[in-house]
Image (spheres, rainbow, N blue to C red):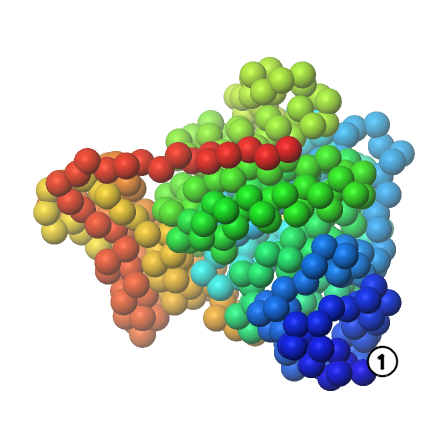
């Protein structure tokens, strides 16, 4: 086989056989094909697509590029959650400990930020010492001992996806439905889970801009799960405006701690409870959403959920003191407030503009080599439907470099619109697919 010839075939709209796909993934994973060839292939797939048979082979090749974990000896149900990426989307950091405190094992493999969207690993690594890179043996033992692990892909677990995931971010090929589906499902199936709850974001701040695309992605991932004996539920959720109030890395850890202690923004809490209750029902821990929500609330109220995060953070090398006192987390030196220029109602809080502004501040990556600044970010002071007066804060930008602040203001300056109203507050949960 010849890598260039296969790139040309896909460029011209042709299809791959399963053995060709296995070879392509193996050549790249083993270092025999350079980044630029895989980048060209990804662009050809982005433009021409791949059919169902190709997608099944592509996902299986990425899944079997490393080890597949086996937790069948554990009595607890093994259920995970995954988001397709949003702005201010720190759901996993509060959700996973709550669900684990309720008796469900959560072997969570997460990713890094992609463009304007945040990454769970980047947020966790703002906790000093927190290790997200774990080998399968340690990953397995953490799940066995704590019922929870929060980690990234190692060289042994879905390594092909880890390599391709980073390359997609730097080559403009992220918003491809088959590539998104195969990326998510290959690493999730490698976890040895029995069920998966997906948070498929829809709107300006998401990779899926329209609900039709989100439904297609959800159905593809549900089908991949079904063909591999894994139950999948997909929530289609709004990302026209940021979720919660914080967009950043250390700041989203603070917000997650707030949720675990019984506080937090209403929309973030609602989504955590909705996704978590489905995880408990999928795992057979509770019979329905109402009893599952009640159990989750009790785990929060008792402190068990917060203690689970502290326990796991410490087990993964993190300093628990910053969770007990989140003011010890990284902060920025500067604070710039965008104020309302008139009285009125917020009719728009653009997730994409806020996300890009946060990335320009240093909270995200323009290329896969970029470093993250953990202390910078944006606090969303007013969201759609909120009434404001002239001079009220709309966005609060935390910055460390003046040039980055200037670049961020080009996007943040018009991200929040105040008008006479009325404002249509978007539904947080737009649809559920099973």
* Secondary structure found at label 1: loop
Residue at image point 32% right, 65% down: 408
Q: Position of residue 194 (x, y in %)?
A: 77, 36
Which quadrant, please, contains the C terminus? top right
157 shown above or below 425: below
Residue at image point 65% right, 53% down: 181
Q: Position of 50 compared to 23: left or right?
A: left
Q: Position of 294 compared to 413: left or right?
A: right
391 shown above or below 63: above
Q: Position of residue 311 (x, y in %)?
A: 66, 38
Report the residue marked by disc 1. 1
Query: Of all residues shown, which one is farthest toward the right?
Result: 73
Which quadrant, please, contains the N terminus? bottom right
Residue at image point 60% right, 15% down: 291
Q: Position of residue 376 (x, y in %)?
A: 40, 59
Tell how many labels.
Answer: 1
Q: Position of residue 184 (x, y in %)?
A: 66, 52
207 shown above or below 277: below
| Quadrant in the rendering for residue 132 | bottom right
């Amino acid at each position: 086989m010849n890598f260039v010839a296969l790139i040309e075939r896909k460029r011209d709209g042709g299809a791959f056989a399963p053995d060709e796909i296995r070879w392509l993934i193996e050549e790249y994973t083993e270092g025999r094909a350079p980044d630029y060839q895989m980048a060209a292939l990804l662009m050809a797939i982005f433009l021409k697509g791949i059919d169902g048979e190709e997608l099944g082979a592509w996902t299986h090749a990425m899944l079997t590029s490393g080890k597949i974990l086996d937790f069948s000896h554990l009595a607890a149900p093994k259920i995970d959650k995954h988001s397709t990426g949003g702005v201010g989307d720190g759901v996993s950091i509060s959700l996973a400990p709550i669900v684990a405190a309720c008796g469900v094992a959560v072997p969570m493999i997460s990713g890094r930020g992609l463009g304007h969207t945040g990454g769970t690993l980047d947020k966790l690594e703002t906790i000093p010492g927190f290790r997200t890179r774990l080998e399968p043996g340690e990953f397995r033992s953490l799940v066995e001992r704590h019922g929870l692990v929060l980690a990234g892909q190692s060289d042994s677990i879905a390594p092909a996806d880890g390599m391709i995931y980073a390359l997609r971010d730097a080559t403009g090929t992220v918003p491809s439905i088959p590539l998104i589906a195969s990326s998510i499902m290959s690493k999730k199936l490698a976890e040895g889970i029995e069920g998966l709850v997906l948070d498929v974001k829809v709107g300006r701040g998401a990779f899926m801009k329209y609900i039709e695309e989100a439904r297609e992605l959800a159905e593809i991932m549900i089908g991949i799960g079904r063909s591999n004996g894994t139950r999948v539920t997909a929530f289609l959720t709004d990302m026209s405006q940021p979720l919660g109030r914080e967009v950043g890395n250390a700041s989203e850890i603070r917000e997650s701690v707030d949720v675990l202690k019984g506080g937090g923004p209403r929309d973030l809490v609602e989504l955590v409870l909705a996704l978590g209750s489905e995880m408990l029902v999928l795992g057979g821990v509770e019979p329905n959403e109402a009893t599952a929500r009640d159990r989750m609330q009790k785990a929060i109220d008792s402190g068990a959920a917060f203690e689970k995060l502290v326990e796991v953070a410490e087990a993964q090398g993190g300093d628990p003191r910053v969770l007990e006192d989140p003011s010890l987390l990284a902060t920025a030196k500067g604070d710039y407030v965008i104020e309302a220029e008139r009285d009125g109602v917020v009719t728009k809080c653009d997730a994409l503009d806020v996300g890009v502004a946060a990335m320009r501040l240093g909270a995200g990556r323009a290329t896969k080599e970029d470093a993250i600044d953990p202390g910078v970010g944006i606090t969303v002071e007013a969201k759609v439907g909120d009434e404001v007066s002239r001079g009220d804060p709309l966005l609060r930008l935390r910055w460390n470099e003046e040039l980055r602040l200037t670049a961020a203001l080009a996007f943040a300056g018009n991200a929040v619109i105040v008008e006479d109203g009325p404002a249509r507050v978007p539904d947080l949960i737009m649809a559920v697919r099973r």
